[in-house]
Image (spheres, rainbow, N blue to C red):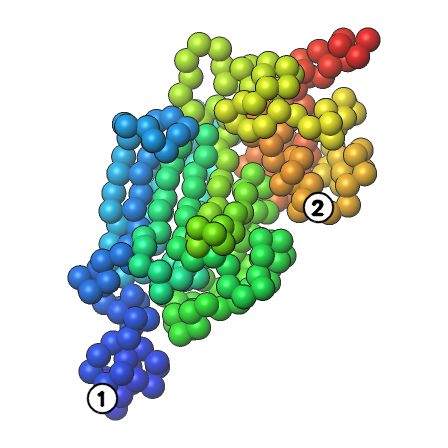
Amino acid sequence: METTRILENLGLANGDTPNLAGLLLFGQAPQRLRPAFDIKAVAFPGTVLHDRHYLDSEDIDGNLLEQYRRSLAFIKRNLHHVQRQQGFNTLGQLEVPEEVFEELLVNALIHRDYFVSASIRIMIFADRIELISPGHLPDVLDTEKIRFGLSNRRNPTLTSHAVRILPYRGLGTGIPRAIDAWPMITLDDDRQGNQFRVVIQRAVESGPLSGPSRDQAGIESAAEGKETETGPPLQQEQVTLLCRMTGDHAAAELMSFIGRSNRSKFREQVLAPLLALGVVEMTIPDKPNSSKQRYRLTAAGRALKAEQRSSDD
């Protein structure tokens, strides 16, 4: 068969002209025709968007596979590597598991709204990474549904072929798998702004240090009920949880301490902020979704617990 007929049969062209899916998957320079369908990536030294200085910046173009590879490389070179009980001479592991970005980048490229003439944005801050895709969630989908693996194909032709080109499974499991690997992920379906934002919290110690450590500054501010740069002040549930923790606890045990039954909401609303603040840590940090995973207080958490008990007395 002729190439044009094959492309038509695959839904990638109309006669001699590739459609948008064909252009994005196989075009040599798709941005010559669709300049907004690229990725803008910037790494900032601080925690605010309006910072005048940046550490790294790149306009990432090419077909979807090229954009995926270059975006993942940009993220990896702008994050820290940590040893996590490895040998002294090893490179160490990425501070946030690489599979988290593999899943989220593919989702951004496959499920963005290509009727919106805007770029995907990757912004790396000292305390978080933000991935922003044009277009809010389609139809009746919301953040709670996609957390549990429900999906709705916005671009069916693109997804049917991307499964053979990108690390994409097409089962709606990408975001749940990313959250299992790194619970400190927040999803924001901004319907008014017509965009979908994923915020991945970095480990507290990842940002630049000046003066008192970020851990200590965050603990002192939280204990005083003030807003911190890593998140809001501790809620009563979180204070209760800290006071009841005595050793290594499974997530189910922590949920029982405060009467929570929804595991996803517990992770997002209670546990993830404590991990980001540095008062709670994982016993197996390099395997966040391990069935043997337990959580315990850090030195900063024990100090806050003792301070809380003293104030209660």
Answer with the quarter of the image where residue 17 lies: bottom left
Is residue 247 toward the left or the right of residue 32 in the image? right
Q: Which residue is drawn at 56% across and 39% down?
A: 184
Give the residue at mark 1. Answer: 2
Q: Which residue is drawn at 48% across and 33% down?
A: 202
Q: Is residue 234 above or below residue 132?
A: above
Q: Position of residue 108 (x, y in %)?
A: 42, 55
Is residue 121 toward the left or the right of residue 298 in the image? left
Which disc is residue 263 wearing?
A: 2
Q: Mark 2: which amino acid?
A: Arg
Q: Residue at x 68, y 31 (%)?
A: 295
Q: Where is residue 311 in the image (x, y as percent from the top left)?
A: 75, 10
Q: Mark 1: which amino acid?
A: Glu
Provide the secondary structure element on which disc 1 rests: loop
Q: Where is residue 256 in the image (x, y as percent from the top left)?
A: 81, 38
- Tell me the quarter of the image containing the N terminus: bottom left
